[in-house]
């Protein structure tokens, strides 16, 4: 049952007439379980009113808005705040952001001819290079490829440019350009998600030898455990992932590696255990779940993290927790295949938290960031110009 006082305070918030005491009262009400349905109803009403006022805005924009409630984006200059992005807290934050719906829609209504509206999100696109020199463009009608006894799409379709049932007997390189992503399933059942501007080299090895990959860019791995007999003992077959800065040894786990040129190499462990060997150093560094290893200038450091913030890209969202704007826009630039230029270099260090959908056009993402009041963006010839608001 809707609490009349809750509705009164909510509407006063939208009209910017809350006193400090009333704001505290509203926050306390938001924290109670029995207000979730009432809050959703109020948000639905607010969105419905704006849909009538802005009929030209696509319906899926409103759908994403209700799901992400304008992305929970906010700027902060305080110390790191670790948030549990569960539904209840998302909804609670939503009430304090609904007021920006109208302002954002007003800005969107002025962007009908803006270049941002024409820059679409990335899609499934990749190319395959075989050791014999053949270059094969993978179809964007498929999202996954299987490196099994033969090469094929995950749905069983054959790959144009390869002979039917052609066996795998040579090393291969799969490249995902900016504006792309691709999913790979290995013969042992291991799964790999490649992010934009990334490259993966698949090394053919004899049965029982370590499974070996080389990569640059970003990838998420779900590694299947494989066994072999050695001296009458059943042991796990190692899984090696090499980047220019390190080698990760895996025995069966889920983890993410970000190894873009010019950036620190970050390995984030979701579950299991991995060991990291820095280039030029034989020492193995063990990484535990909910930890991230940062390799830079031949040194390694470890920090505690919420892995969800670093692997959500494979599930269709950008997730930021006290991240520099520079890091955020680097990801956005790769996904939308745009360049980033800063009018003021100090803007790179602004901190943001939130969740943004990766399936929206560029304008949605930039307006969500701009709604914090810290920055503004213009786009020209596939370059995003960042200015202080």
Image (cartoon, rainbow, N blue to C red):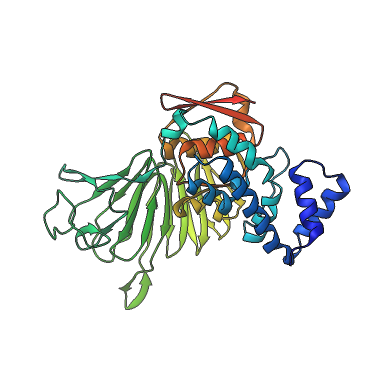
Can you see residue 326? no
Reply above or below: 2 against 114. below
Left or right: where 181 falls relative to 388: left
Looking at the image, which is closer to me, 159 or 241? 159
Q: Position of residue 218 (x, y in %)?
A: 43, 46
Single out the residue that lies furthest toward the left: 163
Q: Residue furthest top?
A: 343
Of residues 234 and 389, the one nearer the viewer is: 389
- Residue at 38% in and 66% down: 224
Query: Image check: 309 left or right of 117?
Result: right
| Residue beneath the point at 86% across and 44% down | 19
Q: Is residue 30 above or below residue 34?
A: above
Q: Residue at coordinates 32% horizontally, 78% vertically from top-left?
A: 232
Counting the numbered discs, the total is: 0
Q: Position of residue 85 (x, y in %)?
A: 62, 56
Q: Position of residue 259 (x, y in %)?
A: 44, 43
- Residue 184 quadrant: bottom left
Can see residue 207?
Answer: yes
**Residue 301 or residue 155, whichever sits in front:** 155
């Amino acid at each position: 049952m809707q609490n009349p006082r809750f509705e009164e305070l909510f509407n006063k918030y939208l009209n910017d007439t809350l006193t400090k005491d009333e704001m505290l009262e509203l926050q306390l009400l938001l924290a109670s379980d029995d207000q979730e349905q009432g809050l959703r109803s109020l948000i639905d009403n607010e969105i419905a009113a704006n849909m009538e006022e802005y009929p030209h805005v696509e319906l899926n924009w409103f759908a994403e808005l209700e799901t992400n409630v304008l992305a929970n984006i906010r700027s902060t200059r305080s110390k790191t705040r670790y948030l549990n992005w569960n539904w209840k807290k998302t909804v609670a934050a939503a009430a304090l952001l609904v007021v920006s719906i109208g302002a954002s829609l007003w800005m969107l209504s002025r962007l009908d001819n803006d270049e941002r509206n024409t820059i679409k999100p990335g899609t499934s696109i990749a190319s395959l290079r075989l050791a014999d020199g053949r270059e094969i463009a993978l179809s964007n009608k498929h999202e996954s490829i299987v490196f099994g006894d033969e090469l094929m799409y995950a749905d069983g379709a054959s790959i144009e440019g390869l002979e039917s049932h052609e066996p795998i007997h040579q090393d291969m390189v799969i490249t995902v350009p900016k504006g792309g992503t691709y999913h790979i399933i290995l013969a042992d059942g291991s799964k790999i998600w490649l992010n934009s501007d990334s490259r993966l080299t698949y090394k053919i090895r004899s049965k029982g030898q370590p499974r070996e990959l080389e990569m640059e860019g970003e990838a998420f791995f779900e590694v299947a455990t494989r066994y072999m007999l050695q001296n009458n003992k059943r042991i796990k077959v190692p899984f090696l992932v090499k980047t220019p800065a390190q080698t990760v040894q895996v025995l069966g786990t889920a983890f993410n590696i970000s190894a873009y040129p010019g950036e620190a190499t970050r390995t984030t462990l979701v579950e299991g255990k991995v060991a990291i060997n820095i280039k030029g150093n034989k020492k193995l560094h063990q990484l535990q779940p909910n930890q991230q290893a940062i390799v830079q200038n031949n040194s390694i450091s470890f920090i505690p993290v919420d892995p969800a913030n670093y692997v959500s890209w494979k599930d269709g969202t950008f997730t930021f927790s006290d991240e520099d704007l520079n890091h955020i826009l680097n990801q956005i630039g790769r996904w939308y295949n745009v360049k980033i230029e800063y009018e003021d270099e100090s803007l790179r260090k602004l901190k943001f938290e939130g969740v943004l959908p990766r399936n929206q056009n560029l304008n949605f993402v930039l307006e969500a960031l701009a709604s914090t009041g810290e920055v503004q963006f213009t786009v020209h010839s596939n370059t995003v110009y960042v200015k202080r608001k």
